Image (cartoon, coloured by chain):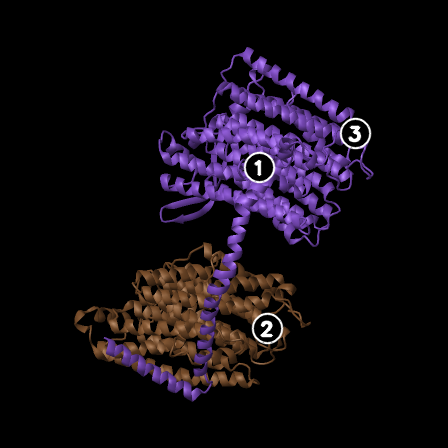
Chain colours: A brown, B purple
């Protein structure tokens, strides 16, 4: 609980700092608060007490995901020092909103009551709607915020409807109680419960950007400020997946839910990878890549294997590292190319900044799942789970889609290592950014030889 | 300092050097880079010497585990180093001779603009070689094994602007790869049989096993050894490897890497002892290689080629010793050979340096006045390799020949013939280079001290190296043999069971005949310089030998051409006509689908809401219908 309180308080402190114009202290305070949270979580590792009248439970996975999300936020805040340096107004609000959103994320990775799940998702999302519109003078940013809000409200509708039906069928919001209820064979074909589950999952799938609930993601990713895009595709995605897994792992799922998940998996894998092939704008490419990764992550969950929690966590950690680093490099390249986002802005990167190019290469290879990177280990473990769950055909389909995916990552690699035809602005890399990029680049390789398991 | 830390430091220092030099190669000057590289290898030598000093042979070897490396499903392979008599011997040679050659390279490479890269690669080689000899299991050794192969490839082709050099580098690489396949297969077999790749565990479990698998495993290991150590049939790369800078030839292609095969065989001697069939094969391959290479050496005109064939031939002697089960004799010869062959190569390098790049001995001669230190040290090296009494080569080679006599006088006679040829081509080289009158146009000058100091040190070692394993006959205790015996755990050391009289007779016979050969060589090459004419004028047999028994041409006809033909045709037909259109078709199709599906993403929020709703309804219908 102290972690949640600390983060909220730090968020408020940040707002006050902004009010008094202490811009330089913002990132430092935020990072200090996050590190404090990490320390609290890490030292309180052994505690597992239900909080808030049993609607939140900080068990092992909850702590691990909190650490991952807080760690990713630290990286993003460090990047923020340079990113927000040229923004004049409302910087404090951006940091504070990210922290508030993170609080929502922490709540949904530790919920043990469906009301908390809903509240957590809203606490996570509402700051995001504002953050997506963070560039107040940019039309695209405003458009992204609006679209995100409208579609997000829609999805919240699904979620609420689903939760209500689940309550109606089971008479409880408590996850454990619903789990016990659903394990009863007599309730295996309860239509109200089934419909409630499907609607709830659809609402959650919106946050995961799983097809057919993905429509918001390319537009919002593209329109949002890059730092926020990075936040959405790492912290928010991690939170959503952890919550999704927490939900389905606690229940005895009817077969129909399995069918729905498999259908979504196949659709997501297909659409994410295939549409990404034709993307030339880097942020859109990353949006579809994010959808594609949602497909692989779903594949890890559909089998209901007890190991899928470990694999999910590992995959998300690998994905987070690579994504944060790549979005930072994108920002730097975009700045050097006067705001362009076409992948050709990476051209000549290797000549100018060999280390940055090599780090980018490592991260792209990791996303593509090339051996000796964490992304490979992650995909490999997902495929093994898929085979263990008996989904041979779908696993083969996923492998084929992974192969297809190499193409669009390789396109970016090619740009980064091709010589530039004409002179352009040189990439300026601030020391902090360099540090974060290096951490991410080395991290995706180091993680490959250090397999993580959930406590 | 704890032994664990010291042991880790030995390979870590050159590795750090390689990384630092590679990173700073544009910022460092040639001398600074050379100095750093030399200092680090010298540091590794000091660490090895400290380890050696603190090593108690009676207590046996120890394993230093650095970290868990491979640990999956019943396979546990740590990244660990083994410190025992065998690895210490090799470590001292690699770092000691290595440091001298690094020092020498400062002078040799000072004008090359890519000198820092050179030193980075040389340090990387030292690291890989140390990993090879220090590994506590086959896999760690194998990393080193591949690493030295890579560095050898890089350094042979160091002057990559000359196409032939690249060809030579590729040839070395490909031939080594053939050997590597053997090594991998051997590892697989051993793992399958023993469930581990740790040397001590395998040697423990193997003793007493009588199994055809042993023959297969040892034959594969030996195939690996023939690749690295340039034995028949994989020997033709080594002479071509002389394309690299001369210090490379001295370090990699004479003193250290090429002895990796010998090292590996000694390391796994327990296995070889269980496969007498393989031992016989090794014995005869070694003999054949020793003779074949020595005969080719007789008519070569390139100073480095002569030394290269001499190396192949000497390696043959080492394998003869291995085939006879005389492992300590083989290691003894490895050691002395490292001294005198490194000396000879560095001397040759000094000559080449003095003559501004000239390597043809027909355009040398009479250099003993101008390059005095080089001459004296080269002379010492020549005497040592020819095996004149009391020099290091005398003791090590005679030990092998005594073992050979014990097996069969015929073998002894063959090896004696090889030794005589060795004496002949080496003194031919010495006389043609340093005696008589100068036949070239360059202006010879002595090399700088960074180059001559290593020569002098190596010359002293070439003379005194014999003391390491002085036989009882000369009042010694065979110290090296007893030291190596402590290495393990099963390495068996055959005792020489010849009586003193026979030993003296054999030594005298060898010495007298070598003396006669030197006298003949003196007459032909020192008094008057008899140069080889055109190959076309030679009698058939001599021409065949001078053309290196046409082995290269044979390989070209047997392997290169058929494979080249196959490759060209597969490319033209299978690749271009079948595979490529198919692959391209799949890719194009995927791209087209992507283009089409992309159309759904209109950017219209209202449409998206509708699509989401439709998607949900379809999904629900599909799901509920299906259940």
Q: Are marks 1 and 3 in contact (CB under 8 Å)?
A: no
User: Which is more foreground, mark 3 or mark 2?
Assistant: 3
Tell me the distance, in whole angstroms, between the alpha carbons under discs 1 and 2. Answer: 48 Å
| Residue position for label 1 | B258
What secondary structure is marked by label 1?
helix
Are the residues under badges 3 and 2 in a single subunit? no
Q: Are marks 1 and 2 in contact (CB under 8 Å)?
A: no
- Seen in the picture, residue B304 relative to A231 is either above or below; the reply is above
What secondary structure is marked by label 2?
helix
Chain containing the residue with disc 1: B
Q: Position of residue B414 (x, y in %)?
A: 56, 23
| Residue position for label 2 | A344
| Residue position for label 3 | B368
Instruction: Look at 68% across and 45% down and name the residue there.
Output: B36
A272 or B55, which lies in front? A272
Chain containing the residue with disc 2: A
The C terminus of chain B - image quarter: bottom left
Q: Position of residue A365 (x, y in %)?
A: 50, 63
Q: Position of residue A90 (x, y in %)?
A: 56, 80
Q: Position of residue A391 (x, y in %)?
A: 31, 65
Q: Residue furthest top?
A: B501
Does the rendering let one see residue B334? no
Tell me the distance, in whole angstroms, between the alpha carbons under discs 1 and 3. Answer: 31 Å
Are the residues under badges 1 and 2 in a single subunit? no
The local crowd at label 2, few if under 14, some if 14 to 19, many if 20 or more residues have their Cα within 10 Å, is many
Chain containing the residue with disc 3: B
A449 or B104, which lies in front? B104
């Amino acid at each position: 609980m102290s972690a949640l309180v600390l983060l909220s308080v730090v968020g408020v402190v940040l707002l006050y700092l902004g009010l008094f114009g202490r811009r330089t202290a913002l990132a430092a305070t935020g990072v200090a608060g996050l590190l404090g949270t990490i320390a609290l979580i890490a030292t309180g590792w052994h505690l597992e007490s239900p909080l808030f009248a049993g609607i939140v439970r900080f068990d092992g996975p909850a702590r691990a995901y909190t650490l991952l999300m807080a760690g990713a936020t630290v990286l993003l805040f460090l990047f923020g020092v340079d990113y927000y340096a040229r923004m004049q107004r409302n910087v404090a609000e951006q940091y504070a909103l990210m922290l508030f959103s993170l609080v929502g994320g922490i709540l949904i990775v530790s919920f043990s009551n469906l009301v908390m799940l809903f509240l957590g998702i809203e606490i996570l999302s509402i700051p995001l709607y504002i953050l997506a519109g963070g560039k107040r003078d940019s039309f695209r940013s405003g458009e992204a915020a609006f679209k995100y809000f409208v579609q997000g409200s829609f999805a919240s509708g699904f979620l609420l409807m689903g939760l209500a039906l689940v309550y109606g069928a089971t008479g409880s919001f408590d996850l454990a109680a619903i789990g016990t209820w659903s394990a009863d064979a007599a309730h295996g074909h309860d239509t109200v419960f089934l419909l409630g589950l499907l609607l709830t999952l659809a609402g959650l799938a919106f946050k995961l950007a799983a097809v057919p609930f993905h429509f918001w993601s390319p537009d919002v990713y593209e329109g949002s400020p890059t730092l926020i895009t990075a936040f959405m595709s790492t912290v928010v995605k991690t939170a959503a997946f952890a919550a999704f897994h927490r939900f389905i792992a606690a229940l005895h799922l009817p077969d129909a839910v399995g069918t729905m998940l498999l259908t979504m998996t196949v659709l997501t894998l297909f659409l994410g990878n295939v549409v990404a092939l034709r993307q030339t704008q880097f942020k859109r490419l990353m949006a579809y890549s994010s959808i594609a990764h949602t497909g692989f992550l779903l594949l890890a969950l559909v089998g209901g294997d007890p190991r899928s929690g470990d694999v999910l966590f590992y995959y998300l950690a690998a994905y987070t590292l690579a994504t944060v680093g790549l979005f930072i490099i994108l920002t730097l390249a975009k700045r050097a190319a006067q705001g362009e986002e076409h992948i050709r802005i990476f051209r000549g990167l290797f000549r100018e900044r060999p280390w940055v190019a090599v780090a980018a290469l490592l991260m792209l290879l990791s996303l593509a799942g090339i051996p000796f990177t964490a992304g490979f280990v992650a995909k490999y473990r997902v495929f093994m789970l898929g085979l263990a769950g008996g989904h041979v055909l779908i696993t083969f389909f996923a492998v084929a889609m992974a192969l297809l995916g190499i193409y669009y990552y390789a396109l970016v690699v090619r740009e980064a290592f091709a010589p530039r035809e004409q002179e352009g602005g040189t990439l300026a890399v601030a020391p902090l950014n360099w540090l974060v990029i290096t951490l991410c680049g080395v991290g995706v390789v180091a993680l490959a030889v250090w397999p993580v398991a959930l406590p | 300092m704890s032994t664990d830390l010291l042991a880790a430091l030995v390979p870590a220092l050159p590795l750090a050097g390689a990384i630092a030099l590679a990173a700073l190669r544009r910022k460092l000057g040639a001398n600074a880079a050379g100095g750093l590289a030399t200092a680090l290898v010298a540091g590794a030598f000091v660490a090895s010497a400290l380890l050696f000093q603190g090593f108690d042979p009676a207590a046996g070897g120890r394993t230093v585990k650095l970290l868990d490396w491979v640990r999956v499903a019943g396979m546990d392979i740590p990244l660990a180093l083994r410190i025992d008599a065998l690895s210490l011997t090799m470590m001292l040679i690699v770092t000691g001779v290595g440091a001298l050659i690094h020092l020498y390279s400062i002078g040799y490479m000072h004008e090359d603009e890519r000198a820092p890269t050179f030193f980075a690669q040389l340090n990387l080689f030292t690291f890989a070689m140390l990993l090879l000899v220090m590994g506590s299991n086959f896999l760690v050794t194998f990393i080193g094994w591949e690493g030295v192969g890579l560095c050898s490839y890089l350094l042979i082709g160091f002057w990559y602007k000359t196409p032939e050099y690249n060809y030579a580098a590729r040839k070395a690489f490909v031939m080594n790869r053939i050997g590597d396949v053997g090594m991998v297969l051997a590892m697989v077999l051993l793992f399958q049989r023993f469930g581990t790749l740790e040397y001590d565990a395998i040697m423990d479990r193997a003793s007493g096993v009588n199994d055809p698998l042993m023959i297969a495993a040892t034959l594969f290991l030996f195939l690996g050894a023939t690749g690295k150590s340039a034995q028949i049939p994989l020997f033709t790369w080594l002479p071509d490897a002389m394309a690299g800078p001369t210090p490379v030839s001295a370090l990699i292609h004479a003193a250290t890497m090429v002895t990796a095969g010998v090292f590996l065989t000694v390391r796994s001697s327990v296995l070889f002892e269980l496969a007498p069939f393989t031992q016989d094969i090794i014995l005869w391959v070694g003999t054949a290689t020793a003779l074949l290479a020595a005969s080719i050496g007789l008519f070569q005109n390139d100073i480095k080629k002569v030394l290269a064939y001499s190396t192949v031939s000497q390696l043959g002697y080492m394998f003869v010793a291995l085939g006879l089960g005389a492992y300590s004799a083989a290691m003894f010869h490895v050691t002395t050979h490292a001294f005198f062959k490194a000396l000879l190569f560095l001397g040759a390098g000094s000559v080449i340096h003095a003559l501004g790049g000239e390597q043809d001995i027909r355009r040398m001669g009479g250099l003993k006045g101008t390059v005095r230190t080089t001459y004296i040290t080269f002379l010492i090296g020549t005497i040592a390799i020819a095996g004149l009494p009391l020099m290091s080569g005398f003791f090590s080679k005679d030990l092998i020949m005594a073992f050979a006599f014990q097996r069969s006088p015929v073998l002894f006679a063959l090896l004696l013939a090889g030794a005589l040829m060795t004496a002949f081509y080496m003194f031919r080289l010495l006389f043609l280079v340093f005696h008589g009158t100068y036949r070239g146009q360059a202006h010879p000058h002595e090399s700088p001290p960074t180059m001559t100091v290593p020569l002098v040190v190596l010359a002293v070692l070439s003379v005194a190296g014999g003391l390491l394993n002085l036989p009882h006959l000369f009042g010694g205790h065979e110290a090296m043999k007893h030291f190596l015996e402590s290495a393990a755990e099963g390495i068996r050391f055959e005792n020489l069971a010849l009586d003193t009289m026979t030993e003296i007779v054999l030594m005298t016979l060898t010495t007298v005949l070598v003396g006669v050969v030197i006298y003949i060589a003196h007459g032909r090459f020192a008094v008057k310089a008899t140069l080889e004419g055109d190959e076309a004028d030679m009698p058939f047999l001599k021409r065949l030998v001078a053309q290196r028994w046409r082995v290269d041409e044979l390989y070209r006809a047997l392997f290169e051409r058929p494979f080249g033909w196959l490759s060209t045709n597969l490319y033209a037909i299978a690749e271009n006509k079948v595979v490529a259109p198919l692959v391209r078709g799949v890719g194009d199709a995927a791209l087209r689908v992507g283009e089409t599906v992309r159309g759904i993403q209109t950017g219209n929020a209202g449409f998206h809401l509708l699509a989401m709703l439709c998607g949900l309804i379809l999904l629900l219908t599909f799901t509920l219908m299906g259940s």
